[in-house]
Image (spheres, rainbow, N blue to C red):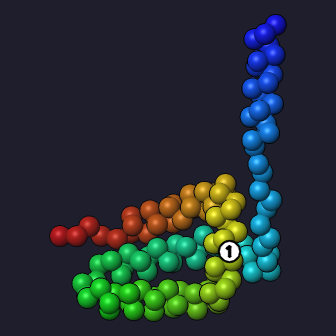
Amino acid sequence: MTKILTGLLFIFALGSCYHTTPDPSFDMTLVIPADSMVTLLTDLHLADGVINTIKVKEKSLQHLSNEYFSAVLKKHKIGRDTFDESLHYYAYHTEELNKIYEKVIVNLSKIESMVPPAE
């Protein structure tokens, strides 16, 4: 009987320590739909790959990275605030983000398979 009471007391003690945080509020008008996020992130990772192959000074590299980032957002007609809100949303909804990145990886793998091997 003492073991049962101790066990129940332990469970209640753990339950009282558990705090849930409320969902942060998101401006859903700014959140990019998952399918569009897949293509956007695919393009951003491609741009990042290009940037990483360029040999320039670190200061120039940061400037180039910002230009590529802006160009990809412009191509997709997305503002920085929309991108930031979407990242915040998907970072909180990790299961959705995982599904998005599974598709991004598939896209990048398909693109990689089309590139001829370096000689």
Give the residue type that dot 1 points to.
Ser
Question: Quick check: 38 above or below 50?
Answer: above
Number of other residues with Cα within 10 Å of mark 1, as a class: few under 14, some 14 to 19, many 20 or more: many
Question: Quick check: 113 above or below 79?
Answer: above
Which quadrant is the N terminus positioned in?
top right
Which quadrant is the C terminus positioned in?
bottom left
Q: Residue at x 46, y 66 (%)?
A: 108
> On the image, which quarter does residue 75 sit in?
bottom right
Instruction: Identify residue for label 1.
Output: 86
> On the image, which quarter does residue 60 sit in?
bottom left
Nearest the camera: 115 or 61? 61
Residue 99, how many percent across, how many down? 63, 57
Q: Is residue 12 visible?
A: yes
Farthest top residue in view: 1
Residue 54, how many percent across, how many down? 28, 83
Residue 53 as seen in the image, left or right of residue 26 = left
